[in-house]
Image (cartoon, rainbow, N blue to C red):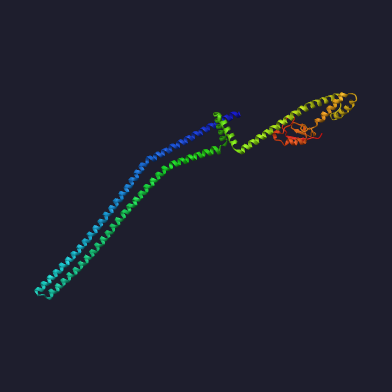
Amino acid sequence: MGLVNLVFCTIGKCFNFISLLLDLNFLIVHSVIRLLAACITFVNNLPMLLTNSIVKCWNFTVFCMVTMMDSVTLLAQGTVNMLGRWLHLLGGVLESFKMVCYLSSHVLLRVRDLFHRGLLCGHCLLQQVWEGCGIAVSLVFYLVNTVVNLLLIGTQNVYSVVVSMWEAVSCPLQKAVELTLTLFTFLYSSLVGTSVVLWTPIRLALEFLGSLGHIFVSVFLLNIYGLILTATIVVTATVYMNPELTSLGARRAFGFVNSVPTLHLIQRALHRLYVLERGVWQRLQRQASRLHQTITPVYRNIRLMDDLWDLAYPSSSSTDRPLQKLSSGEGCSSSNGPPADSLLTLLKEHEERKKCVICQDSTKTVVLLPCRHLCLCRDCTHILLRQPIYQQNCPLCRHMILNTMDVYL
């Protein structure tokens, strides 16, 4: 059931990985197509943009020229009008002087006539004086009126000139301000369009990078088990499809290890340790087999002696057997020679059984657990337990030593 679940999970992960690859391919193709479309749109709109810019610049130049010509025309017209009004004023002054001249000549003619007549009475003289005064007053009023008219006309002319100059100056300024605002609006719209055209591929690239980052975070940080399983499937498929890739990788790894001096020294040290460990292991196996071959007959003889002792003394206990064996050996030594020799041999073998199976000098005092074999002394046990964990085995049955227990017999 677990294998079936693993197979289905693997198939599901494969489908998810294929879907991820398809989505990534679609996103990349879509981004590339949008980028190409944006570039084509920009290239297509570039001539129109340049044409509009040239047309706007030409319109601005023509408008500036027309405005300057209009200003010059208005200034010339104002100057001509001012000159005409000054000439008209000068003509009025000359006309006034002519009237004064006419009046003076008329007065002089009348005075000459009067003097020629020689008959000037007081009434006529007074009348003439009053007429002269009236004429003089009218002349003064005429002169004042003329001067006032001249002042009014001059003021009107000055006002007209100022207004014309203001219009001549303000109209180009107004046109220049309007043209500047139009130019700024055109530049702003052009910059906005250009920025939109240039920002579109950058935005697509940023969206693509964001999608890649999201995929990276989702795969590498949030779904590490799926990543490990996918990597395992990819590596397994790669090794299965390319069998020579494994040998090539192994050769390159060995070449890299051989090329590094430190790794080469470590490899030689490990090889030396492996050879030493194998030699120690082989020596222990030979000693164990030798001890097993030595102990097996001893066990057989001891069991045989126990069976014979049970047959000879069925009522004796197992604790009295060594004494009974010894006494029986002493009792029977006087009566029967060959059984006594065999009993002495058995006793010697029994004493040898109490010796450690490794050193053959000290007495067995340590029971190995869990196999419960009494076969080692304390010193040999310490030496054996200092060996690596895979070498801490019982010398009789080769079971792993988990614990030891001291006994005293």
Residue at horizontal 25 percent and vertical 58 percent from the top: 79
Q: Which quadrant of the figure contains the N terminus?
A: top right
| Viewer-nearest residue: 276 or 137 | 276
Name the side, left or right, on which 140 lies relative to 297. left
| Viewer-nearest residue: 167 or 382 | 382
Furthest toward the bottom, the residue is 122
All told, the count of numbered labels is 0
Vertical comparison of 316 with 100: above or below: above
Residue at horizontal 43 percent and vertical 43 percent from the top: 199
The answer to which quarter of the image holds residue 260 is top right
Furthest toward the left, the residue is 117
The answer to which quarter of the image holds residue 121 is bottom left
Name the side, left or right, on which 251 lies relative to 363. left
| Viewer-nearest residue: 149 or 167 | 167
Residue 192 image point, x, y percent: 40, 45
Q: Can I make out residue 9 in this image?
A: no
| Viewer-nearest residue: 125 or 112 | 112
The answer to which quarter of the image holds residue 166 is bottom left
Vertical comparison of 50 with 91: above or below: above
Residue 7 image point, x, y percent: 57, 29
Residue 145 image point, x, y percent: 21, 65
Residue 320 image point, x, y percent: 86, 29
Vertical comparison of 36 with 141: above or below: above
Furthest toward the right, the residue is 334
Name the side, left or right, on which 224 lies relative to 46. right
Residue at horizontal 82 percent and vertical 30 percent from the top: 351
Residue at horizontal 29 percent and vertical 51 percent from the top: 65
Q: Can I make out residue 85 in this image?
A: yes
Q: Which quadrant of the figure contains the C terminus?
A: top right
